[in-house]
Amino acid sequence: MTMKRRDFLKNSALASSVFFVPSFVKAMDGHLLAPTSGFRRLVIIQLTGGNDGLNTIIPYRNDIYFRSRPVLGIKKNNAIRLTDELGFNENMKELKELYDNGNLCVINNVGYPNPDRSHFRSTDIWHTASGSEKVLNTGWVGRFLDNHADKAHEAIEIGNSLSLLMKGKTLNGTATLNPRLLHRIAADPYFDTVLSNNHDSHLSEHNMGYLYRTMIDAKQSASYIYEKVKVYKSDANYSSRSLGRQLRTIAQFINSGLNTKVYYASFSGFDTHAGQPRKQGKLLKEYSEGISTLVKDLKKNNTFKDTLILTFSEFGRRVEQNAANGTDHGAANNVFVIGDSLRKPGLFNGAPDLTDLDDNGDIKYEIDFRSIYANILEDWLQVPTDSILTRPVPPVRIV
Amino acid sequence: MDVKHIYHLYRRAAFGILPQDAESKTTLSRKQVVDELFKASRDTTPLEIDQGPFPAYFAMDRRDRKRKLGELVMENKDLRLTYARAFMERMLNPIEPLNERMTLFWMSVFVCHDIIPPYVQQYNNTLRKHALGNFKHFTLAVAKEAAMMRYLNTNLNLKGHPNENFARELMELFMLGPGNYTEDDIKEAARAFTGWAHRIDGTYFLRPFQHDNGVKSFMGWEANLNGDDVINIIAKKRECARFISTKIYRYFVNDMVNEDHVEEMVEVFYGNYNIKKLMRYVFMSDWFYDEINIGSKIKSPMDLFASIYLLVPYEFTGEKEMVFLQRLLGQIPLDPPNVAGWEGGQSWIDTNTMMTRLKLPSLMIGKGMIPTGTFRDQFIEVAERPYGNRLKVEENWEPFDKMADGLSSEELIQTVVACPLPEGTREMITQMYKGDKRDLVIQLMSLPEFQLT
């Protein structure tokens, strides 16, 4: 991304005021007062690789489904019943509990016009909230930061590197897997010396400016997160696998009262071109157990009521299975929204219409994903959508 | 040739150059320097390690194989790490520097991953073999690699049940880029690749009964096309030459693309697809040496490792340190993050990787702290290696001491940092410098400026 000189000056001015106080924490006193209750936040989880939605929410009374998937089709008695028509994959019994408690909304057939079947392009489309014809280089969470935040840690990606989703024009989110380590590194006194000696003039340059700005963001976020989180430790029973570890970190951050508004974690492995049943089953089980542990952990700490969890995948998969007992890239898919104050818990809309597929044999979209973003921005995070979504999309009312 | 330009050429086209070697070339013309660079990569030395039980297993008659291949792979997991280390060492001490650099570049184009050690080695050497060869032949060779067929499911692509994975990535990631083909092109191309398979020893063959011999309609052609035809038809598009030229420009010149320069490259590359000719054109162009292109690219993690190693060689003495650091920084050369590979440029840098990069030199070749020339450092708690005992690295200062002896601090700065030092940074460095060149080099390597190449 490019940075305008004005933007840089704004950031470096901010930074230099920080360097002359002995501790970053002191400079951020105001933020420490951020209320832990009534402070709404969003957790975004991407099932990366393209989750097969049809074997997640299974239309087990549909003949076309079984004809298209002679091997992969999941029969009614192997699914968890939701309605006469639809059931969960059997690996998702914890999610069924959330469904029964009214904490889960399943939105079927979510997508966008002229769907792109490339992982990267479609991920970019979901991350930037662009149409498929338009390339944007900021994410929708990044633009939220530009307009409604002033610190990099107000959006945190639990990972080693930062996704486009979290990159704004003037402010990027923070990426970290291990905040303790980040803090120890950032606290080296040499870096204070470097920053106190730099001048604005050369820093408007393309890559050099980006390096300095990221360094400033890193130092600030690292000490903030570290100071806030060091006292709290979650005792909930998360799995030690990748998603479990990420969710544990998210819970620690939330329950420590970080004033972070958006968290993002990517859970990969869903690109099941071959040998799908075992692979997808394992992943869905890990997802279902992980989410359930997270919700219980948040409930125990009274933070669930202020947390909304959005799960999406960059696309669904083809209705017809391939020769390798897998499925190829598809289009529209289901999205999960989990929270305590859903307007319409349960199934938000009907199952996909398998009699009306697109030219590729993929599910057509009924709900534009940006209308879910619009709903979350307006009704959950309570900010106007016009500076974040590039064109007006009428929100659906999920939350 | 100006010493500054020699440094620039070698930072981009190889893995850097030592000051005395750069100095020795200053009497040569640009053409002579570039000729030398290519001459040094005339041959290709494959990277091979002892593949343990695999060669014997592959040579065995099918009926005599008592074990499953998967078991063998699990039991010999270490071979993967051994190969990854050998590859890293090769790049740090390249035999044919330009060729090795090109090999790393092509890994970010022909993205692939496998867990069967001999397939990984075979694939890696195919990249090395064709790195400066003909792009069309290269693409065909890569398409027929066992590792690639497994990675993109070409080996599961059967007549009547086409698997589109390879056909899609061939056009999207290897040859054309999005927007230059249709969904129908993908479906038809997938049919052309049906029946492609490999033997257990990793060699390619066609299963004739699984190959679709029907007429495919692909990019304006209506014929019984096979996989080779598809690659040849794609290469007829000028967009293919543009796609690769743009990738080369971004990687070797500047991540902000100058369309005029790329158009010149397309003119040289299109039709003949001679990679060597194209690279020579780039390194001979005046614009390659424009100020805007010098010290303006963000180093890949591999560049970062190599630029430290060049001046102060180190050795990872623990088993896992190398991969651990590569993972932290976001580039494990034989293990791409996804099918699109590494995005490069600014995407290498975020809050987490930035701080790790800044701290890395002091961890690897220093004592875990960056000298600031003041007394207080010693009393600060963070003055220890933050990765604790996990990071086992042994550094060797001897060559540096010898080399730095004849260099002024100004010359040393030019050797370490690729971009001009901004005024404030220069003042700080000058103030701190008390004559200890080891301290100076660690300080320089711990600057944000050191992240540029």
Image (spheres, grey):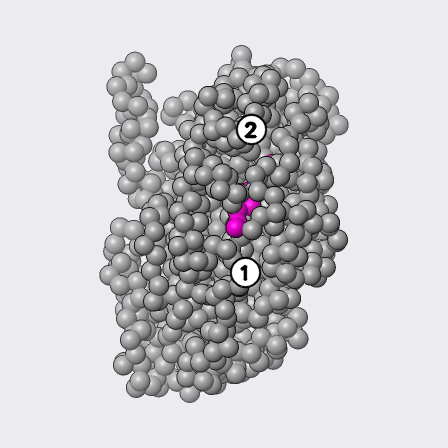
Q: Nearer the viewer, residue B148 or A177?
A: A177
For the point 31% across and 32% down, the residue is B73
| Residue A322 vertical position relative to residue B238 in the rendered view, above or below | above
| Residue A298 vertical position relative to residue B410 in the rendered view, above or below | above
Q: Nearer the viewer, residue B290 or B110?
A: B110
Q: Residue furthest front?
A: A101
User: Which quadrant holds residue B274?
Assistant: top right
- Asked whether disc 1 touches disc 2, contact meaning CB atoms under 8 Å apart, the reply is no
Q: Are marks 1 and 2 on the same chain?
A: yes
Q: Chain of mark 2?
A: A
Measured Cα–Cα span from mark 1 to mark 2? 32 Å
Q: Which mark is residue B99?
A: none
Is residue B359 something that shows in the picture? Answer: no
Residue under circle 2? Answer: A83
Amino acid under disc 1:
Arg
Element carrying mark 2: loop
Q: Which residues are magenta?
A: A332-340
Element carrying mark 1: loop
For the point 52% across and 50% down, the residue is A340
Reading the chain from its start, which is encountered first: label 1 or label 2? 1
Q: Chain of mark 1?
A: A
Q: Horizontal placement of B395 versus A85: left or right?
A: left
